[in-house]
Image: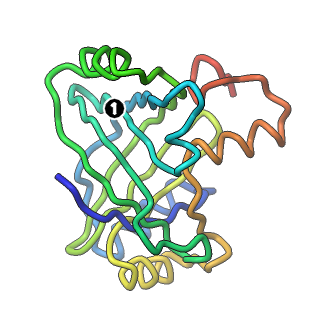
Amino acid sequence: MMAVETEVKFRVHDLAHLEQQLAAAGFHQVTPRTFEHNLLFDTPDRSLRARQSILRVRRYGDRWVVTHKAVPPGASAEDRHKHRIETETEVADGDAMGAIFTALGYAPAFTYEKWRTEYADHTGHCVIDETPIGLFAELEGPSEWIDTTAGALGLTQDNLMTLSYGRLFDEWRQQTGSEAQNLTFAEIRS
């Protein structure tokens, strides 16, 4: 299915408080805390990353999902929300999809992991991601809903970011001097 995804991320400093705020704002839990393993594929010269595009195989609990994301035409880096054209489908065997991508000239380029808990209200989603470099949340839905929900959660524009987990990992590596190559719990021990 293809759609335009609109989202922002923010750091979570107090998980229990955020969960209370979500409940008070009418959110309900859609998916309990579930482990997620993501493997990005790219060409040897990283041409997908250069175009701000990804090809991903995700294992989320017992489900496999293959996703391609790309920047939509006319998107601006100055926008306060991140917009991506997202095409994804569930597959029976993610490892087989990885083998197909490799046979087509793509190679594993980056792995990232997290524990994700999903919440929703009548319009959008808030997911809480426990990553090896910290706790983050994402608001995904229409732009106006994101702004209203962020305000209801006590967030300002300064709290919101449009970076991917790959970019957040790059920033973390620069700040810490870590030599980790992937955003995995095995490579990054807290």
Return the x and y of residue 127 as percentages of the image width and height. Answer: 39, 54
Position of residue 90 in the picture relative to residue 60 (left or right)? left
Location of residue 120 by image quarter = bottom left
Residue 123, compared with residue 177, is above or below; it is: below
Q: Closest to the observer: 176 or 170?
A: 170
Q: Report crowding for label 1: few under 14, some 14 to 19, many 20 or more residues within 10 A (C-alpha).
A: many
Residue occupying image coordinates x 65% and y 38%: 133
Residue 158, compared with residue 62, is above or below; it is: below
How many labels were placed on the picture? 1
Q: Closest to the observer: 15 or 66?
A: 66
Return the x and y of residue 65 as percentages of the image width and height. Answer: 25, 35
For the C terminus, the quadrant is top right
Residue occupying image coordinates x 31% and y 41%: 67
Which coloring applies here?
rainbow
Residue occupying image coordinates x 59% and y 17%: 186
Position of residue 106 in the picture relative to residue 51 (left or right)? left
Return the x and y of residue 56 as percentages of the image width and height. Answer: 38, 35
Location of residue 131 by image quarter = top right
Q: Which residue in the structure is indicated by mark 1?
A: 58
Return the x and y of residue 188 as percentages of the image width and height. Answer: 66, 24
Q: Closest to the observer: 100 or 149?
A: 100
Residue occupying image coordinates x 41% and y 76%: 146
Residue 183, compared with residue 93, is above or below; it is: below
Q: Which amino acid does label 1 sit on?
A: Arg
Position of residue 17 in the picture relative to residue 32 (left or right)? right
Tag 1's secondary structure? strand
Location of residue 91 by image quarter = top left
